[in-house]
Image: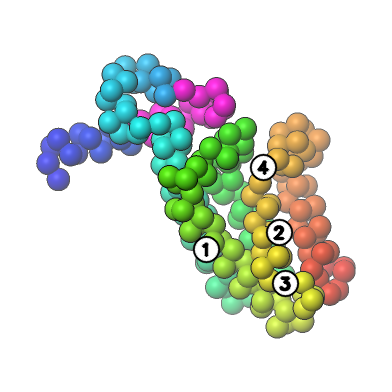
Amino acid sequence: MSKKQEKFQKRHSLILNTAEQIIKDKGYYAFKMSDVSDYLDIAKGTLYNHFLSKEELVFNLIYPKMSQSTTTLKIIANKQTDAITKIKELIRATLESSYFQFVLLSFPDMAALFQEKNSSELEKVQNEMIKCFKKVIDQGKREQVFHDEISNEYTAHQLLIISDPLIYSLLVQNKKMTHEDFITHTTRNFLFGIAQNQSQ
């Protein structure tokens, strides 16, 4: 790598780290590209050489987090343990991932991240998440602890909805419920819907 390329990569990482911190402080809705250029004291043209838009910058923040979350889910799905234990671990891992925490900050304009330019890449990762969920659900049916009549596709998408931050934001961020209670209630509610033994 040439010195010019190395300098570009260092600045690229610095821009991403700075943007993430600003979003944590201000929230996605209030975040502007100029916040980064002002903070780093760089020209807007320099910033746009790295990222053409706010959405592209945020995509480059969220995509690695989403990919890492998927890797964690795959590890859980492939563990040598029972399906109910895996479901509990999948839900906790989802709600404690850096991906979920970032989505929580980005919620007001989350749809902007799924614009046409980026949607295919995000959908690929989401599909990998769904595969993990379906694998565990199928295991639960083979173990005869989950209902057969509910389709794996439907149940997996219900599990995916857990990463939607709306309910978490309303309950936990508004201090109506603790993070741990939210995980417990979410897990019990999900298992109640699919478990043959309703005491799970």
Mark 3 / mark 4, whichever is N-terminal = 3
Residues at discs 1 and 3 in contact (Cβ within 8 Å): no
Q: Secondary structure at mark 2?
A: helix
Amino acid under disc 1: Glu
Near mark 1 (Cα within 10 A), the count class, few <14, some 14-19 or many ≥20, is: some
Dot label at residue 158: 2
Picture quadrant of residue 179: top right
Among the 4 quarters of the image, the one containing residue 145: bottom right
Gap between marks 1 and 4, in whole Å?
A: 20 Å
Q: Position of residue 88 (x, y in %)?
A: 69, 62
Which residue is tagged 4? 165
In the image: residue 197, left or right of residue 172: right
- Amino acid type of disc 4? Pro
Structural distance between the alpha carbons of marks 2 and 4: 14 Å
Disc 2 to disc 3, how far (Cα)?
A: 11 Å
**Callout 4 crowding tier (Cα within 10 Å): few <14, some 14–19, many ≥20:** many
Q: Which residue is mark 1?
A: 128
Tell me if mark 3 has few (under 14), some (14-19) or many (20+) residues whose alpha carbon lies within 10 angstroms of its own: few
Q: Earlier in the sequence, mark 2 or mark 3?
A: 3
Q: Nearer the viewer, mark 3 or mark 4?
A: 3
Q: Is 133 inside the magenta-drawn segment?
A: no
Q: CA distance from mark 2 to mark 1?
A: 15 Å
Provide the residue designation for mark 3: 151
Is disc 2 in contact with disc 1, using a CB cutoff of under 8 Å? no
Per the rendered image, the range of residues in magenta is 14-32
- Is the N terminus in the top left, top right, bottom left or bottom right quadrant? top left
Q: Most prominent secondary structure in the magenta stretch?
A: helix
